[in-house]
Image (cartoon, rainbow, N blue to C red):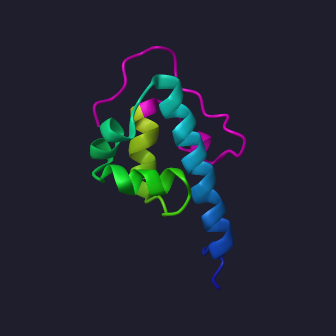
Amino acid sequence: MSGSQVPAAAAADYDAIIGENVHQLMWRSRETQTSLAPRLGIGQSALSLKLRGARPWSSNEIAMVALHFRVSIGDLFVAGGTAAPASEAPRSTV
């Protein structure tokens, strides 16, 4: 394994952490899977799998989620659900 690769177990952990944080952001903003999924270019069922950590998040999807909810990309990787949307400013239409 090269120095830039992440072990599969760690990558799966990050997918679950990101999914949990995205789910919390969705809950706080009352966003549904049906409305968020097309913004990411995926179907609702694929988003559901990502939220549960059963499917990996792409870097593009992570960036689009961060932009949509106005949080930093780094916030999505913090275990414990610390990601919080920026004020009540309008969200991006990504």
Tell me where residue 39 sits by quadrant: top left
Left-right relation of 81 to 73: right
Toward the right, the furthest residue is 80
Q: Is residue 26 above or below residue 39?
A: above
5 shown above or below 70: below
Q: Is residue 31 toward the left or the right of residue 10 in the image?
A: left
Q: Which quadrant is the N terminus positioned in?
A: bottom right
> Residue 76: percent from the left, percent from the top?
58, 44
Residue at the far bottom: name it: 1
Q: In this view, does 50 lie to the left or right of 42?
A: right
Q: Which residue is drawn at 68% across and 67% down?
A: 10
Question: Which contiguous range is marked in magenta?
Answer: 69-94
Q: Which residue is drawn at 55% across and 49% down?
A: 19
Q: Residue furthest top?
A: 88
| Residue 58 picture location, percent across and down | 43, 60
What residue is at 59 percent from the left and 28 percent from the top?
84
Q: Is residue 62 above or below residue 86?
A: below
Q: In which quarter of the image is the C terminus?
A: top left
In the image, taking residue 52 as reference, residue 1 lies left or right, namely right
Residue 27 in the image: above or below residue 43:
above
35 and 17: which is toward the camera:
35
Prevailing secondary structure class for the magenta stretch in the rendered image:
loop
Report the residue at 53% width, 63% height from top.
54
**Magenta highlight on residue 87:** yes
Place of residue 11 in the rendered image (x, y in percent of width and height, measured from the top left) = 61, 66
**In the foreground, 54 or 5:** 54
Q: Where is residue 80 in the image (x, y as percent from the top left)?
A: 72, 41
